[in-house]
Amino acid sequence: MQNRITVVEALRKINAELRLLPTERVSLSAALGQVLREEIIAREAIPPFDNSGMDGFAVRMEDLTKIPASLRLDGDIPAGKNPVGEVKPGSCIRIMTGAKVPPGTEAVVPVEWTTEIKPDLVNINRCPKRGAYIRRAGQDVTEGASVVNRGTQITPPVVGMIATAGYQEIKVGRIPRVAVIVTGDELHLEANVPLPPAKIRDANGPGLAAQVLDVGGLVTGPLVARDNPDSLIQALETSQGADVLLISGGVSVGTHDLVKDVLVQLGFRRCFWRVRQRPGGPMLFGTLGSQLVFGLPGNPVSAAVCFLQYVRPALLTLMGAAEVRPPFLRAMLEFPVRKAAGLHHFVRGKAVRQAGGQLVVQTTGPQASNLYSSLQHANCLIHLPEDCVDPSGGQEVKITCLPWSTID
Ligand code: AMP
Ligand code: MG
């Protein structure tokens, strides 16, 4: 236990190695998932002018003292056309949703509240409130206002907002290139045939690649290396263009766990090996030239949890994100949980919100690190720190929502 570091130290050692990836200019339409490296300022007010919220008629209030009111139809303003005249006493102007309202408009009467008596005569059957269905300039955003902050990861609504603010190209952090290498002689890669004896299917290659894509990274691989030095060296050489190497398996203390030694042969600088945590205790981290290397234990839950705890925040930091980890939420543990003293446990949990608003959490069942279903059925991780001893039912714990889940 002595030579193992704490979860906090592991995070600190990783952070010390992280450098922002370069900034690049990209087309907004291709920027989904990247992190903004500039502040977005609205070039104009949004909306840019007073416009109609309905298809209907622009009217003056003084003409509607008696309902129904008959008004002379005095023109038509489609969206995109600058109105020429104003609304004159006793008349109205047909207007489309989004069209600029003409001077003199005090309300828009929806077409459903009207009857067209003759081609140039409209009856208003219901009186709108003053200002009704006029969407005011700047109602959403005022000109020059900051609409998206630097460090924001670009989601579909952020794309829409930036486009509305008048940008076609934006500055973002380059996408991290992540090479996924899975190791093990036991991995059988052909999907549609029965498993040969003593072989297993590869969960980590596709699983880790999906986590990289989910956070906005670019995956190369997954490559498969066998438990011999030549095969590992070949995979590492193939991955030279990556910013980050994710290696699954082979970092523990077994005689076939060769990853550390092979990395060292190639010039690896080790920052740490082994963390006082479960799952993921044998995790390895360091650098190989300019590459960050995460050696993740092969058990699929260990690999996935180490990704969530260490790799995901690191990738977001490289991208320049302001928020790199989910906020801690407080929840009540429904049942006692068995826990090793002196280890930080990441327990897969299912949290639900009770009627009063309080979160209650229970584990997803047996927590051994080979049991993938414990992760698949979880919506959160329960964080039980080293000094927590045998947490009991009713105890308050910290949880984080999994990135692809919600708690409801
Ligand atoms: P290792 O870290 O290489 O000692 O592997 C630990 C456990 O994880 C062993 O039971 C391996 O068979 C298993 N394992 C390693 N790599 C994978 C993988 N890519 N997919 C599924 N299980 C794996
Ligand atoms: Mg192995």
Image (tube, grey):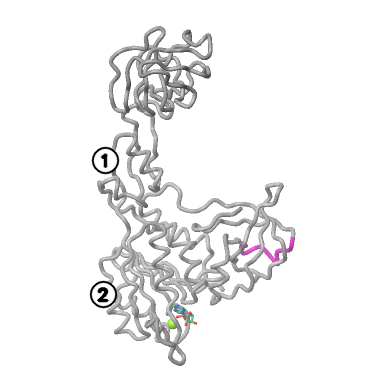
Question: Percent position (x, y) of residue 187?
Answer: 41, 83
Residue closer to the observer: 112 or 6? 112
Quarter of the view holding residue 314: bottom left
- The residue that appears at 29% across and 47% down in the rendered structure is 29
Q: Earlier in the sequence, mark 2 or mark 1?
A: 1
- The residue that appears at 43% across and 27% down in the rendered structure is 53
Examine the rendering and report whether any part of residue 11 can be seen.
Answer: yes
* Secondary structure at numbered mark 1: loop
| Start-end of magenta stretch | 384-393
How far apart marks 2 and 1 lie (CA) works out to 38 Å
Question: Percent position (x, y) of residue 150?
Answer: 37, 41
Residue 137 vertical placement versus 7 (above, below): above
Please tell me whether the stretch drawn in magenta is mainly helix, strand or loop. Answer: loop
Residue 336 vertical placement versus 262 (above, below): above
Q: Which residue is mark 1?
A: 168
Quarter of the view holding residue 366: bottom right
Question: Percent position (x, y) of residue 405?
Answer: 53, 57
- The residue that appears at 26% across and 48% down in the rendered structure is 24
Quadrant that contains the N terminus: bottom right
Residue 323 vertical placement versus 15 (above, below): above
Residue closer to the observer: 222 or 399? 222
Give yes or no for residue 348 being in the magenta stretch.
no
* Marking on residue 237: 2
Spot the residue most to the front: 118
Amino acid under disc 2 = Glu
Give yes or no for residue 391 being in the magenta stretch.
yes
